[in-house]
Image: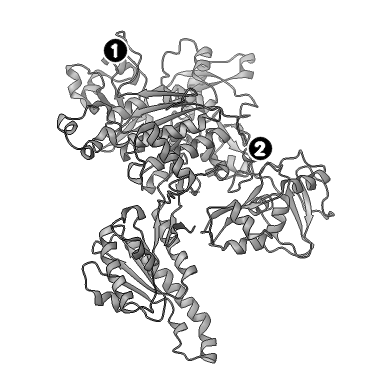
Amino acid sequence: MKRYFLVAIVLILTTFPGFSQEVVKVQKSAVTELENGKRFYLHPVIKGQTLYSISKAYDLSYDEIFRYNPESKNGLKENEILKIPVHPETKSAGYNASTQDTLLKKVALSADEEKDFLLHIVQPGETFFSLGKKFHTNVDELKNVNPGLGDYPKAGQILKIRKPEADSAKAEIDVIIHQVKPKETLYGISKQYNITINDILQYNQWLSERGLQVNDFIKIPKKIIPPPEKTTTESGKKHKDYLIHKVKSGENLFRIAKKYGVSVDGLMLYDTSLTTNIHLGQEIRIPLIKPTTSFIIHKSIKPEKLRTIAKKYEVPLKELKKINPQLKRKTRANQLVRIPINKDDLINILQEEDKIDSVSYLPVKDTAHIKQCIEHLEGEHPKMKIALLLPLYLDKSTPPEELTKGDLKKLKKFKPFRFLPFYESFLLAVDSISRKGVQVELSIFDIDHSMGKTVKLLNNEDMLDMDLIVGPLFKDDFTQFSNFAKLHEINIVNPLSKRNSFVENNDRVFKLMPDYRERRYLLSSAIQEDFPGANIVILQSKKALFHQDIHYLKSYFYFQRNTENLNQSFSAVLHSNIADSTLKKWHIHDLVVEGSGFDKLKNTLSSTQDNVVILLSDQTSFLKETEGKLIKYLTENPESSIHLFTYVNPEKVNSISTQTFIDLDTHFICDNGIDYASPGVKDFVKKCRENFHFEPSPKNYAFRAYDLGLFFLNAIYLYGKDFQNCLHYVPQNNLYNEYHFEHSPRNGYNNVHWNLMHMTKDGILKEN
């Protein structure tokens, strides 16, 4: 690269910083695994560590270490992974109340100390880091007030802990700190603050590991602002955080939301009794939001036409399309749409009410109007630390002699070269964000299938300072790192996996590969809108890999047919022949046609209805076989029409002519939405060629890495490392695929966006 003076890049090889010859202090491993019902620490042996120091750190005898690591009797080896049994007592929630009372009676605080300190008994399994997180302090502070503590806490030790200050949560404006009193329970605390137990667990995930104990300090999310008692006021009367709007003739909730720059979701969250069905004279409380953007967010609960949304908000359709260039005609369910507002008009409204400096603290619940997002913290986060975990196989970096003498294709398949385009494209994203004056410290770690590398890195203290972790790419490695990220509250991105299980019960995981269930939802809604009442032919290969898609599509269109026929039947009897074709809508045929003759397919196609052919396969060979039969049918039946939908990615079908796809009115549902004619794609391709001398393509993951880097680095730059609540405001200029994240409580963020690409005489056009 020509300019990386703002980017500190640290390449971490297979091993970590050098070891001295003196005895190295031992820290308990952060990695555990379950084997035959028993849990073990996985401890990496570092040069200088001894059996004595390891046995002391884990409070084990030599015999216990030898029992599970018999080879260690012959001496320890550097980089060896030892299995250290987790003591049975660490499975319990800790010392019971009577035991704690007995221990605490042995130590007393002076009257002056009681004002600033409390006593805590170290529980089995607790570490300096977990204690620091729990009590909102750090390791140095713990050691300062507990001289002689040693290098790690031991179960049963009594520590003096400085009480958190009242304003210690100032960096987290949405929480307060609660100290647990004797006999308090999670249920009682949740009722005290009018929140749910899940709310508490979401902010204090360590509670799920060992339960609630006396003197714990826990974060309590500030409860939703309750609506004030209803009073009869004239429209526009001043209040501290809101004003009253009285509904006038011709108004609806959408236009009122637009007028005040508050989303409909925001209005309903502020006043939980509010619905979209409002009436003349109704009084609506409007939370006062300081305007900083030129739009509000509309959430489509179900698929909606853009024309309908424009009418709801009384916005010209052209303006709506301009501010939402990714949308064509219709939204999908739960899609977010920007609604343009006039900031100057809104400021005038608030100035008239003398409320321009009042900002409402809306709850962090499914609304884009969160204080930190609205205030737009651009420039507040000029430094960030990123960990990029890729299988670079640096220990195999010299290709075999037969490869160096062979052809270039074989050399490119050499493992260490496979993910270089991913890495280099990510660097281009880093360079782009650095041009804004951001200092990015990027650490690249070589993480492949080796558990030894994973364990060592998870025990590297530098990982605790990361603002974002990207990767690793393999399942077992990612599982370990995602658990680490959850424990230490660091966001982690999985760029290439299809597994939905990664986002389950871990609200720090972002999965970028779109959810495959959403693909069939997009397919069914597109057909229903564009080809109502069509004759539907579902084609599958002999492998039949899409059982769930077939079941869903058949159920969906059977339901549509029965509903429409039921609605039409009475009028059809009165006004038309009962055999009218309108009562024969949504014919559904399910065929296995791979390798079968032409007649089987021909007999399912209609000469009087639109034929929608759904090819449930992502195999190019099956598509090529099928398109030949469909073209033959059109040749024999020139009056018929066929509309082909397929899951095959368009970049894989070079062997089929463009004209064939145009004749079949082909629609591709895929994650690849690259527009090679766009300026952004042209610029990226040029940079890859000039700086790294490779050609970016979907196969080498270059586009995905660049999109990932730009999006998440921008998110941190704008909103800090905990940017989750502001995802809707992060700018997207993605080249490969957009990110539309769905998120449920305590789970991670799953991308649900698929591209609907349509082959036309003007090229492949994106329709959603």
Residue sitting nearer the eye, 229 or 513: 513
Residue sitting nearer the eye, 518 or 625: 625
- Picture coordinates of residue 379 (x, y %)? 60, 30
Residue sitting nearer the eye, 546 or 147: 546
- Picture coordinates of residue 534 (x, y %)? 43, 75
**Residue 194 left/right relative to 748:** right
Query: Which quadrant of the structure image shows residue 552?
Result: bottom left
Q: Rounded to the nearest whole Å, what is the CA distance between mark 1 and mark 2?
A: 51 Å
Q: Amino acid at mark 1?
A: Gly
Task: Identify the secondary structure beneath mark 2.
Answer: loop
Q: What residue sits 29% from the left and 8% below the top? A: 21
- Picture coordinates of residue 135 (x, y %)? 54, 25
Q: Nearer the viewer, mark 1 or mark 2?
A: 2
Q: What residue sits 69% from the left and 47% below the top? A: 226
Can residue 86 be seen?
Answer: no
Query: Which quadrant of the structure image shows residue 546?
Result: bottom left
Give the vertical position of 217 relative to 626 (above or below).
above
- Picture coordinates of residue 351 (x, y %)? 81, 43
Q: What residue sits 44% from the left and 79% below the top? A: 585
Q: Which residue position holds label 1?
A: 48
Can residue 659 be seen?
Answer: yes
Q: Earlier in the sequence, mark 1 or mark 2?
A: 1
**Residue 562 left/right relative to 58:** right
Residue placed farthest to the top in the image? 22
Q: Which residue position holds label 2?
A: 375
Residue sitting nearer the eye, 269 or 533: 533
Q: Amino acid at mark 2?
A: Glu
| Label total for image | 2
Task: Identify the secondary structure beneath mark 1.
Answer: loop
